[in-house]
């Protein structure tokens, strides 16, 4: 009998712990919910819709045809330039400089992003 009351007391303390945890950290838990669960849910919904439509959306072809109709050589040169700027050897020094500036200003949390 004593063992039963002890296990109930432990479960109450666990429930109290969870309750206190939710009450004290509800903002960060809500932020995690909004930042992790909801985007995953949107991706899951889009995946199911693509699977149901046999690989594409009804509006996919008109958008692709519109984009291809605007193609010209000047935009191709611009796209190649942006691609070269986005290479590892270009981005690494820029991001390193930004990290050093933030480190010198002691903006530690900004470095996390």
Image: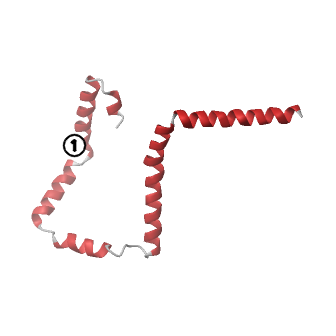
- Quarter the C terminus occupies: top left
Q: Name the residue nearer the viewer: 4 or 98.
A: 4
Q: Name the residue nearer the viewer: 30 or 96.
A: 30
Q: x and y percent of residue 8 in the render? A: 78, 36
Q: In the displayed structure, would residue 40 be above or below residue 5?
A: below
Snapshot quadrant of residue 65: bottom left
Specify the farthest residue to the right: 1
- Left or right: 55 as drawn, with respect to 76: right
Residue ID at (32%, 33%): 110
Snapshot quadrant of residue 5: top right
Residue ID at (24%, 28%): 101
Residue ID at (17%, 73%): 69
Q: In the displayed structure, would residue 81 be above or below residue 50?
A: above
Q: In the displayed structure, would residue 37 be above or below residue 13?
A: below
Tell me the crowding category of disc 1: few under 14, some 14 to 19, or many 20 or more residues within 10 angstroms, Cα based.
few
Residue ID at (21%, 72%): 66
Return the residue at label 1. Answer: 90
Q: x and y percent of residue 108 in the render? A: 34, 27
Q: x and y percent of residue 1 in the render? A: 89, 34
Q: In the displayed structure, would residue 99 be above or below residue 56?
A: above
Q: Secondary structure at mark 1?
A: helix
Q: x and y percent of residue 48 in the render? A: 47, 68
Snapshot quadrant of residue 47: bottom left
- Left or right: 58 as drawn, with respect to 9: left
């Amino acid at each position: 009998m004593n063992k039963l009351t002890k296990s109930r007391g432990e479960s109450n303390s666990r429930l109290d712990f969870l309750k206190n945890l939710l009450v004290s950290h509800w903002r960060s838990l809500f932020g995690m919910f909004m930042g992790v669960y909801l985007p995953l849910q949107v991706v899951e919904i889009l995946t199911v819709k693509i699977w149901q439509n046999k690989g594409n959306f009804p509006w996919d072809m008109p958008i692709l045809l519109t984009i291809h109709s605007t193609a010209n050589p000047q935009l191709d040169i611009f796209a190649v330039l942006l691609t070269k700027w986005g290479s590892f050897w270009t981005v690494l020094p820029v991001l390193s400089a930004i990290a050093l500036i933030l480190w010198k200003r002691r903006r530690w949390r900004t470095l996390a992003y």
